[in-house]
Image: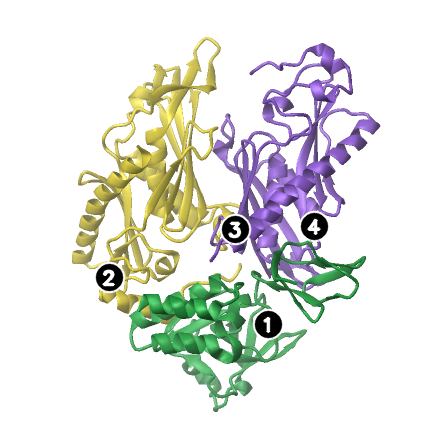
Chain colours: A green, B yellow, C purple
């Protein structure tokens, strides 16, 4: 089946051999879309890839968040989910003095952090992984979280393409918050432009060629 | 209260540094406005209406007219009522319910800017002295907030007022015939109070901020002026301005106001 | 106000549908020209414009997000919250800004029309806010609002079982017509006007229905059938608008 844009309630395909994947349901031998997005088929499994919608936090996601509040035993962090996430003192790799928590992470600062647990109480974060920590400086902006896989690319190929063409370090949080760091603001803005270009076209095939061509024209 | 996603501090720092080089993220200079487009007749039910776009910021403004008795202390003058509403649909920051202070200030500053300037010849809105006058309602609505709703509101109000046509008034039946517009426009003078807000970001003064820039603005001064004469001024937000800075603000605002008026007139031709 | 061209003789013959003259020349089953577009409000999570004849509605969706105030949260599933409002200059006689009862009722009705299709079980304690504003009114405003809202919800990526489409069926004296204009709502001959706004899912389920006027059982049943046909036409336009938004990007 060719990939196609579908709307809720639309019959994507008919046939008993097909199975309903993400955002679809099967009714009377028909696969129906349950969301606006790109329908695609893989080995008879039909799923709809969303083009829009809020961020769904998952265990293991590395995200960029903003410190909302400093509590007695940790920090409340806004990661773009409906609930604030919690980073406990115990999940910071170095020793933190309870009276000096603000010095480690203060309100409004940005941090690269990992989701290590999601339960009824909420979302628990951790800094105990390589590369995680406070974001000191750089250009930070948001893209739709559903587009993150395309911006990163297969095994990071798209991000590498942007890095090679702009000379910037790029970190894409699974929550759609992006950090770009380069040697000049001009370069950072160029990388941002590239990322927004990809975000808009995330549903198209041949995106890598398109982006390469775009870079070629811009130089 | 919902979390409001504002510009992160790291980005704000980048913004301010870039400004010191005289550049903005979208390629503009500090004293450059975004592209201004004005569409006429957004609602055929209004006596005049426009849709104003400043970049992605969008407001719609409509003029409605009604007759009433004049106020006791001004029997020969018509009335003007300017309202401005921040529609919840225009931003995740605006909620339903009674207006918060931001919305109230927006409405009042827009109203004062138009009212106090001498733009409207109120005497010519009189139908019968002491008995009947026109009230002009100028209603502004935000449709998409990407910064600088303040100036967009006044630009819209001015454009709508300039293209509005007075409906026929049947004196015998004391009825306004909305279906029949005359060829007459509102009684306006050549004092057109275009508002230009000047913001301070770090060390730089800018005009027409995007939403991201407005989040970083430390001080906003909205000035309504016409041909170098300032008729309204409001300084908002907490940061203080040096004397030299505020003097520069007056100059920037009055100068750019003329450019914007020119754009408005071209757009509504 | 222009006069109806139909002679009262024609109108008295109840099934002379084809000879009933509508002021704008439409046939009894013909809808007004429709225009639809999504993505009209960049700030919003989802947005759409729906225009039917001279009636224009815009809708924006924000969410799912945390529901405030806290005591209104539902721990079992997310909620839909709708707000409908007409702007002051959408009609001849200016509407004073502020709450009015008609708008409050239509807000609730909009929610009832859409609720059966949205699937918010995965969003406990959260809310999806739908804001509908009427820019220009020529009857059928609540229907245009529901049509715009349904598109905006889909555009926002809200999980939905189906789309919802809405239309007003009218009875002018004894004749059923699709999609009334304001002029038709003010029809004065014979039994006068009856207004029946109906919203349906693409699979043919009725999610909202109201009646303003008088009508016999058989004709009311016929109205639903007429609405079903009209709603399917509207669905095609809504679907096209949603697809176009993505397909237009190269």
Residue at the image point whose x is 69% and y is 29% from the top: C29
For mark 3, name the chain.
B
C12 over A26 or under it: above or below: above
Per the image, the residue denoted by label 2 is B204
| Gap in angstroms between the C-alphas marked 2 and 1 | 39 Å
Q: Nearer the viewer, mark 3 or mark 1?
A: 1
> Which structural element holds mark 4?
loop
Residue B146 versus residue C97: which sits nearer the camera?
B146
| Gap in angstroms between the C-alphas marked 4 and 3 | 21 Å
Q: Is residue A108 left or right of residue B222?
A: right
> Which structural element holds mark 3?
loop
For mark 4, name the chain.
C
Do tags 3 and 1 sit on the same chain?
no
Residue at the image point whose x is 42% and y is 74% from the top: A179
Residue A46 image point, x, y percent: 69, 65
> Which structural element holds mark 2?
strand
For mark 1, name the chain.
A
| Gap in angstroms between the C-alphas marked 3 and 2 | 32 Å
C236 over B207 or under it: above or below: above
Callouts 4 and 3 close, C-beta under 8 Å? no
Do tags 4 and 2 sit on the same chain?
no
Q: Which residue sits furthest top? A: B172
Callouts 2 and 1 close, C-beta under 8 Å? no
Residue C10 image point, x, y percent: 72, 13
Residue A57 numbered mark, or none: 1
Residue B25 versus residue C162: which sits nearer the camera?
C162
> Which structural element holds mark 1?
loop
Do tags 3 and 2 sit on the same chain?
yes
Q: Earlier in the sequence, mark 3 or mark 2?
A: 3
Residue B12 image point, x, y percent: 35, 67
| Gap in angstroms between the C-alphas marked 1 and 4 | 25 Å
């Amino acid at each position: 089946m060719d990939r196609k844009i579908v709307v809720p309630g639309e019959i994507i395909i008919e046939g008993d051999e097909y199975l309903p994947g993400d955002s679809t349901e099967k009714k009377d031998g028909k696969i129906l879309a349950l969301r606006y997005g790109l329908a695609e088929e893989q080995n008879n499994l039909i799923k709809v890839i969303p083009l829009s919608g809020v961020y769904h936090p998952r265990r293991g996601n590395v995200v960029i968040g903003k410190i909302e509040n400093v509590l007695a035993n940790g920090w409340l962090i806004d990661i773009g989910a409906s609930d604030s996430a919690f980073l406990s003192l115990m999940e910071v790799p170095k020793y933190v003095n309870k009276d000096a928590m603000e010095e480690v992470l203060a309100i409004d600062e940005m941090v690269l952090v990992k989701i290590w647990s999601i339960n009824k109480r909420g979302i628990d974060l951790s800094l105990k992984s390589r590369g995680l920590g406070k974001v000191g400086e750089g250009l930070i902006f948001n893209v739709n979280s559903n587009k993150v896989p395309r911006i990163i690319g297969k095994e990071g190929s798209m991000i590498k393409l942007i890095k090679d063409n702009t000379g910037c370090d790029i970190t894409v949080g699974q929550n759609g918050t992006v950090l770009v760091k380069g040697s000049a603001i001009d370069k950072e803005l160029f990388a941002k432009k590239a990322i927004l270009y990809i975000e808009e076209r995330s549903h198209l095939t041949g995106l890598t060629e398109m982006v390469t061509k775009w870079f070629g024209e811009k130089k | 209260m919902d979390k409001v996603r504002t510009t992160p501090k790291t980005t704000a720092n980048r913004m301010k540094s870039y400004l010191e080089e005289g550049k903005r993220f979208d390629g503009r200079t500090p004293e450059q406005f975004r592209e201004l487009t004005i569409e006429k007749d957004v609602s055929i039910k209004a006596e005049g209406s426009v849709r104003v776009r400043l970049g992605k910021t969008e407001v719609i403004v409509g003029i409605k007219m009604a007759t009433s008795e004049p106020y006791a202390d001004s029997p020969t003058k018509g009335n003007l009522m300017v309202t401005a509403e921040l529609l919840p649909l225009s931003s995740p920051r605006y909620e339903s319910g009674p207006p918060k202070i931001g919305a109230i200030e927006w409405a009042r500053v827009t109203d004062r800017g138009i009212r106090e300037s001498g733009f409207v010849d109120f005497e010519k809105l009189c139908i019968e002295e002491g008995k009947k006058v026109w009230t002009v309602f100028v209603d502004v609505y935000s449709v998409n907030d990407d910064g600088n709703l303040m100036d967009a509101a006044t630009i819209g109000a001015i454009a709508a007022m300039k293209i509005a046509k007075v409906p026929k008034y049947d004196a015998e039946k004391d009825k306004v015939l909305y279906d029949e517009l005359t060829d007459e426009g509102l009684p306006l003078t050549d004092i057109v109070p275009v508002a230009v807000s000047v913001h301070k970001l770090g060390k730089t003064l800018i005009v027409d901020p995007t939403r991201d820039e407005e989040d970083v603005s430390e001080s906003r001064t909205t000035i309504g002026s016409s041909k170098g004469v300032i008729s309204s001024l409001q300084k908002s937000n907490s940061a203080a301005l040096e004397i030299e800075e505020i003097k520069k603000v007056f100059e920037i605002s009055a100068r750019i106001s003329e450019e914007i008026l020119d754009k408005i007139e071209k757009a509504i031709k | 106000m222009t006069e109806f061209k139909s002679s009262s003789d024609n109108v008295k013959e109840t099934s002379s549908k084809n000879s009933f003259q509508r002021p704008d020349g439409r046939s009894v089953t013909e809808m007004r020209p429709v225009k639809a577009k999504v993505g009209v409000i960049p700030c919003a999570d989802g947005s759409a414009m729906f225009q039917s004849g001279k009636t224009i509605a815009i809708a924006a969706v924000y969410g799912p997000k945390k529901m405030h105030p806290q005591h209104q949260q539902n721990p079992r599933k997310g909620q839909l919250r709708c707000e409908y409002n007409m702007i002051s200059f959408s009609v001849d006689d200016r509407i004073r800004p502020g709450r009015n009862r008609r708008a409050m009722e239509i807000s609730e009705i909009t929610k009832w029309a859409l609720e059966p299709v949205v699937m918010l079980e995965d969003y406990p304690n959260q809310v999806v806010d739908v804001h509908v504003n009427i820019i220009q009114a020529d009857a059928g405003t609540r229907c245009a609002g529901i049509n715009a809202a349904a598109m905006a919800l889909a555009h926002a990526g809200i999980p939905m079982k189906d789309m919802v489409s809405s239309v007003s069926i009218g009875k002018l004296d004894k004749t059923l017509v699709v999609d009334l204009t304001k002029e038709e709502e003010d029809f004065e001959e014979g039994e006068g006007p009856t207004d029946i706004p109906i919203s349906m899912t693409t699979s043919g389920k009725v999610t909202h229905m109201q009646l303003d006027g008088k009508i016999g059982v058989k004709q009311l049943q016929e109205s639903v059938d007429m609405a079903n046909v009209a709603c399917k036409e509207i669905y095609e336009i809504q679907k096209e608008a949603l697809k176009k938004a993505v397909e237009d990007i190269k």
